[in-house]
Amino acid sequence: MLGLKLPTDPRWVNLAEMSLENILTDHAYCEQKAATSCISLIQSYPDKKDLVESVSPVVTEEWGHFRLVLRELDKRGLQLGFQRKDEYVNKLLAFQKKGVNREDKLIERLLVCALIEARSCERFRLLSLHIADEDLKEFYHGFMVSEAGHYRMFIDLAKKYGGEEKTKIRWQEYLEHEAKIMEELALRGDRMH
């Protein structure tokens, strides 16, 4: 369903389990950045009624997710650490076409959002299936379902504003590039991406 070209190395779940405080911290900041990205889309494209109506509830949902992760940290006696640079997202952003018109820039932004949601969904699925802690399995299952919906929403918006064929071609380019990014990045259990 997600179309990712390179699955996450299954050892990632074991690494994540060994650094639970770090993975939860990174997860919290990912949710915060997702809410901020949605706000930024609304601010940049207030004239796109369908986008504003689709993305507005996601702001609230993502911020709620941030709070859920904070609660999980607290429940486990863990601390929210400092935010770290997200190499994965920065490499995706660097792939965006530069010097394009406002409409094409929107499609680039929507596809980056869709890809981040897709990879997050895939990783939450792995955690929901393979992490030893039963409570965390359920915790991550809920996030997996949510991210799948967000992924679909961003793809649908890109098709609406960029056209089916153009979006499909660019999406495949993003998927190919994302696979290369995944090959290059070191396997780390303290990062969601």
Image: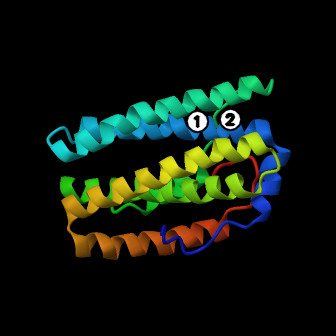
Disc 1: CA contacts within 10 A as few (<14), some (14-19) or many (>=20)? many
Q: Is residue 107 visible?
A: no
Percent across and percent down for residue 187 are: 74, 60
Q: Residue visible at 67% across and 62% down?
A: 185
Between 40 and 151, the one lying in front of the other is: 151
Q: Which residue is label 2 attached to?
A: 25
Outermost residue, right direction? 18
- Badge 1 amino acid: Tyr
Q: Residue visible at 32% across and 73% down?
A: 168
183 versus 193 height, above or below = below
- Badge 2 amino acid: Thr
Quarter of the rendering occupied by the C terminus: bottom right
On the rendered structure, is 123 left or right of 94?
right
Q: Residue visible at 43% across and 63% down?
A: 95
Q: Residue visible at 46% across and 59% down?
A: 115
Element marked by disc 2: helix
Q: Are marks 2 and 1 in contact (CB under 8 Å)?
A: yes
On the rendered structure, is 84 left or right of 32?
right
Between 139 and 162, the one lying in front of the other is: 139
State which quadrant residue 126 falls in: bottom right
Element marked by disc 1: helix
Q: Is residue 70 visible?
A: yes
Q: Which residue is label 1 attached to?
A: 29
Label 2, label 1: how far apart the Cα atoms are = 6 Å
- Where residue 11 is drawn, which disc sits there? none
Percent across and percent down for residue 128 are: 68, 52
